[in-house]
Amino acid sequence: MEFLQQNWYWAALAAVSGAWLMADFIRNRGDTSQLSPVEATLLVNREDAVVIDVREQGEYAQGHIPNARHIPAGEIERRGKELEKWKDHPVILCCASGARSSSAASQLRKAGFSKVYNLRGGMMEWQKAGQPVSRKRK
């Protein structure tokens, strides 16, 4: 008890960070549009999903998911015609951490794409999961 009284700020920090993690877990639990690297691989293999990397050219060149198409997030709207052919196919968007691709996924849903997914954790999670990385241009 004396430890908590002397270090109340650390205890408060631990409680707040734990609550934040729990809230994030609960919020994402019902979201089926977020895929893990393994789920993304299964979708590519089973349903011929298209992977679109929305990072900038330099990031993409350093390594990307094999066969991923490169369309930077800022060009999603402008290159909409190019994406039309995949409107009814599963489309997986990825970036470095999952933030830019989440935003791009929202744009595609608004444009009428029915099967849009975001790679949760982006390329960081992909590589951490030991999935293959390519440097070939697609």
Image (cartoon, rainbow, N blue to C red):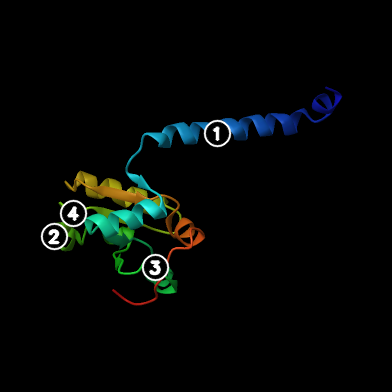
Q: Quadrant of residue 74?
A: bottom left
Mark 3–mark 1 contact, CB under 8 Å? no
Q: Nearer the viewer, mark 4 or mark 1?
A: 4
User: Which is more N-terminal, label 1 or label 2?
Assistant: 1
Q: Is residue 73 left or right of residue 48?
A: right
Q: How dense is the environment of label 1, judged by Cα within 10 Å: few (below 14), some, or many (20 and up)?
A: few
Specify the label residue 85 is tagged with: 2
**Can you give x and y, in whole percent of width and height, for residue 81 in the image?**
14, 60
Q: In this rendered view, identify the residue nearer to me: 124 or 38.
A: 38
Amino acid type, mark 4:
His
Amino acid type, mark 2:
Lys
User: Which is more N-terminal, label 1 or label 4?
Assistant: 1
Q: How dense is the environment of label 2, judged by Cα within 10 Å: few (below 14), some, or many (20 and up)?
A: few
Q: Is residue 62 above or below residue 100?
A: below
User: Which is more N-terminal, label 3 or label 2?
Assistant: 3
The outermost residue toward the bottom is: 136
Q: Quadrant of residue 42?
A: bottom left
- At horizontal 40% and vertical 58% (from top left) the residue drawn is 95
Q: Nearer the viewer, mark 2 or mark 4?
A: 4
